[in-house]
Amino acid sequence: MAPATLVLAVVWLCAQVADPARQPLEKAYEALRAKNYESAIAWFGKALEAAPERPQIRKDLAYTYLKIGEPEAARDQFAEAMRLDPSDSHVALEYAFLCFETKQRATARRVFDRLRRSSDPAARATAEQAFQNIDRPLAEGIQRWKAALASSPDNFSGHQELAVLAEQRDELELAAEHYAKALQLRPDEPSLLLDLARVFTALSKTEQAQQAYLAASRSSVPRVAEAARQHLPARQQQAPDSATAPASPRTSAQAGAKEMAERSYRKGYLKDALRYLKIAHEADPADSSVILKMGWTYNALRQDEQALRWFQMARKSPDPSIAREAGKACKNLRQALARTRTTLWLFPFYSSRWKDVFSYGQLKTEFKLGRLPFRPYLSTRFIGDTRRTTGEVLPQYLSESSFLFALGLATRPWHGLTLWGEAGTAVSYLARQPNLRRATPDYRGGAAYSKGFGQLLGGEAPGAFFETNDDAVFVSRFQNDLLFYSQNRFGYTLPRLGGLRTQLYWNSNVTLDLGRQYWANFLESGPGLRFRLPGMPEALTFSVNLLRGAYLLNRENPQRPNFFDIRAGFWYALTR
């Protein structure tokens, strides 16, 4: 072998031996080729332990995190790579875009602002466009809130929103001004002290920041106080008249993580909330409030299997309210995750206006098809009454008097809204006219929206409530008519009396149709009472309503234009 070749070989071998990250990197790249990303991440971590100042390792690790859907972890690795090699504009762009994606808009804007003056033309053009996409809405929002506050200077939300936008745009003096004004209007919002302290810190106003943190540390809100203490020297963490020792680092970390999780959850940053909740759970595995919040966060992320596991843990909590809430969530999730679900509901009631008992009901079996947003179902409906007709010379039938057998398709509920459609056959149990068939095709579908706010009947506490049930229904058998129903109740849920639960409320109902038939266009309003007796099933509720109504169309109306009606009945529902 030639001497020069021998020297090169020796140098190469020495480099291999001297590189402590060589073996874990080989393992990492081998795992990447096999698409074993979790293993690759573990080996990249070992490589970084051996060579923490090598930016290429952090870049490769960041891209691996992106492959498994962890943008926050990827963002942090790109941040380190950018610190190690500030001249790498491609890494800086990756970091900025991930900051924007993970809701760190102020940081993203700052990095894009620097990069739009880069010597790299491609990076400069990309950064310029991205900067404008962030900066322009912030600037417009600031101007809108300034104009709104000029006419309404005591608008708390306006000052808070303006402060947030100004902080994101690095207009820190403006942010501090409006955080302070918001705090003046709402001194009972101590979290604003943390916001103010953070902005003062960014402005290098250390004394003002420490004063704000000190005031926040004495808050009666534990999470605010704990978060503030993390920024104070030990000698400042006790109030002058306090003899208690400062919180331990473990307790402070847990409280701080809980606060950050709550803030992230409220703002919709669910993955950030989950990360902070994991930190809080590691610090105190027995905190059932954190366990319950983990369940709700996974549920909001549509990871229902994970959510169910955390709810099952939370329902063992010694806190009765947490255990009860988790138990209800478990029940609902099990039903949502089941491959088949059968529901039965019944609604019989007496109407004084028609001197008749009407009955409505449905038996429905749904089938879950993986993660598809809709479910097919089999349905049997019953719609009938006891009186059957009005008894006049030209009698009117008071209900469809039929069983309806159908095959349908319905979307999963989305914020209370469900879309559905079905095709089937209506079989009348009455022989109305000799020339009419008892079995006729029946096609119907539409949209249903249901929502409740406040202290509902199934809750534990008394208080005000509002409920709305709104439907748009197409029915082929009514000359292809489209009907609209809106039933609304607002009132007060009374305190429990033993096992008796009671609501007093006011009804406000409207029914309309496109066919402009008199019987499908009317308004109703009046008081109502709803109650559930001790020992009754949760799904069984009695109601009595006194209604005053008026038809909106009277051209072919054989009835009076106005009417009174007393309706009394019960609602029962069962899911298996």
Image: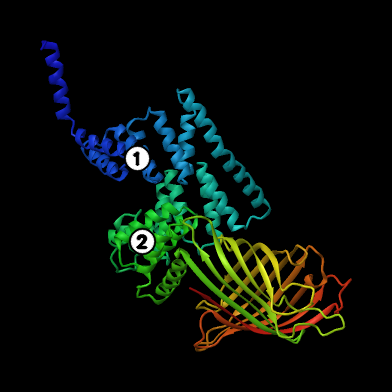
Mark in front: 2 vs 1:
1
Give the amino acid type for the residue marked by disc 1 in the picture: Thr
Horizontal and vertical percent position of residue 492: 61, 79
Is residue 274 rendered to the left or right of residue 500? left
Check the picture and name the quadrant holding the N terminus: top left
The answer to whether mark 2 and mark 1 are in CB contact below 8 A is no
> Which residue lies at the image location 62% right of the left edge and 49% below the top edge?
145
Report the label total. 2
Q: How is the image coloured?
A: rainbow
The residue wearing badge 2 is 255
Which residue ends up furthest to the front in the rendered image? 435
- The quarter of the displayed image where residue 18 is located: top left
Is residue 294 rendered to the left or right of residue 504? left
Horizontal and vertical percent position of residue 355: 75, 87
Secondary-structure class at tag 1: helix
Q: Is residue 215 visible?
A: no
Q: Nearer the viewer, residue 114 or 468?
A: 468
Secondary-structure class at tag 2: helix
Separation of disc 2 and disc 1 at Cα?
Answer: 32 Å
Horizontal and vertical percent position of residue 96: 45, 37
- In the rendered image, the vertical position of residue 337 relative to residue 393, given as above or below: above
- In the rendered image, the vertical position of residue 417 relative to residue 23, given as above or below: below
- The quarter of the displayed image where residue 479 is located: bottom right
The residue wearing badge 1 is 64
Pick whichever of labels 2 and 1 is earlier in the sequence: 1
Numbered badge on residue 127: none
Label 1, residues with CA under 10 Å away: few <14, some 14-19, many ≥20: many
Give the amino acid type for the residue marked by disc 2 in the picture: Ala
